[in-house]
Amino acid sequence: VTSFIHSSEMLKRLDQKIDYRQIFTRSDADILSRFDEAESKERFLKYWANQVVTYIDGPSGIITLKTRTFSPEDSKALASAIIQESETLINELSVRAQRDMIARFESELQRTAENYRSALEAMKTFQNASGLLTPEARATEAGTLLSALLAQKLELETRLYVLRESKVESSPVRQQLLFASQSISEQIDKLRRELAGNSGSAVSVAGVIQSFSRIETDRRVAESLYEAARKNLEEAQAEAMRKSLYLVVFVPPTVP
C-alpha cells in the first residue's frame, strides 16, 4: 500500500478524480514551497514523496498517512482520495488472488467432468450395443442354458444306452435320438466356446466381460477424479475467502 501511494500509478489514478497538480501549484502558495507547473512528472513524483508521507508500524501493521498541502481542505481531500484508491488496489489484489487460486481448480474440475461424461457415454454406448446392463446377466443366461442342455444330453445318452443294451440299434427311435444328441452337443460346444471367449464372435461372454471391465474401470476412475476435483475446488474457494485482503480505515482524514 505504501509503495503504491508513492508510485506514478497512484498519480495516474488520482488524476481521474482530483487535480492534484493544481493543489501544489496554486498561485497563492509560498513560491519557495509550491511546485513549478513546468516541471516533469518525474520531478513531481519526487516532490510528492515529500508532501505525502507514510509510516508503517511493524508489529501492528498500521499505516499512518500524512498529506501536506497549502490549505487544510486540500490536505483532507487529498488524503481521502489516496485512501479510496488504496482500498481499490487492495480489493483488486484480493479478487485477483482469489480468481487465480480458484481458476486452476475450476479448470481441473471442468476437465475431469468432461472425462466423466465421456466415460458415462462410453458405458451407455456399450450397453446399447451389447443389449445388456451388465455382462453378468449374459453369463448367467448362458450358464443356465448350458446346464439345461447338459441335462438333456445326459437324458438322451441314457436312453441311447438302454436301446443299445436292448439290441435295437437300428430302430428309427435310436436314429432320432442320435441326431438330437449330436445337435445338443453342438449347442453345448458353442456355448462353451462363447463362455470361454474362443467362439470368434464379437459378442462372446468373455469379450463382453473384458470390455465391460475396462469401461467400468475408466468410469470409476473418472468419477473418483471428478469428485476429488470438486472437493479441491470447494476447499480452494473456502481458502480464498479466508485469505481475503482488506483495508480498514479506523481514523478517517481530518481537517488540521
Image: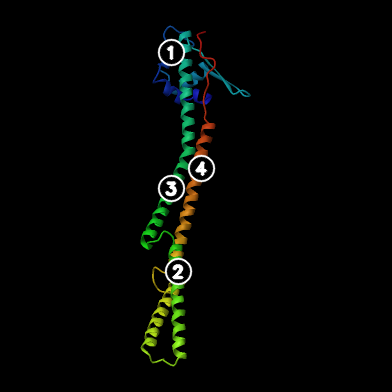
For label 3, the crowd category at 10 Å Cα-Cα, with few meaning under 14, some 14 to 19 and many 20 or more, is: some
> How far, Cα to Cα, is label 4 from label 1?
54 Å
Q: Which residue is mark 4?
A: 231
Q: Position of residue 53 (x, y in %)?
A: 54, 18
Q: Which residue is mark 2?
A: 144
N-terminal label among 1 and 2:
1
Three-letter amino acid code at the position of disc 3: Ala
Determine the image quadrant of residue 13.
top left
For label 1, the crowd category at 10 Å Cα-Cα, with few meaning under 14, some 14 to 19 and many 20 or more, is: some
> How far, Cα to Cα, is label 4 from label 3?
13 Å
Q: Which residue is mark 1?
A: 23
Q: Secondary structure at mark 1?
A: helix
Mark 1 or 2, closer to the camera: 2
Seen in the picture, residue 142 relative to 22 is either above or below; the reply is: below
Residue 188 visible in the displayed image:
yes
N-terminal label among 4 and 3:
3
Three-letter amino acid code at the position of disc 1: Ile
Seen in the picture, residue 226 relative to 92 is either above or below; the reply is: below
N-terminal label among 4 and 2:
2
The residue at 41%/57% (across/down) is: 123
Q: Are marks 4 and 1 in contact (CB under 8 Å)?
A: no
N-terminal label among 3 and 2:
3
The residue at 42%/54% (across/down) is: 119
> How far, Cα to Cα, is label 3 from label 1?
58 Å
Three-letter amino acid code at the position of disc 2: Thr
Q: Which residue is mark 3?
A: 113
Q: Secondary structure at mark 4?
A: helix
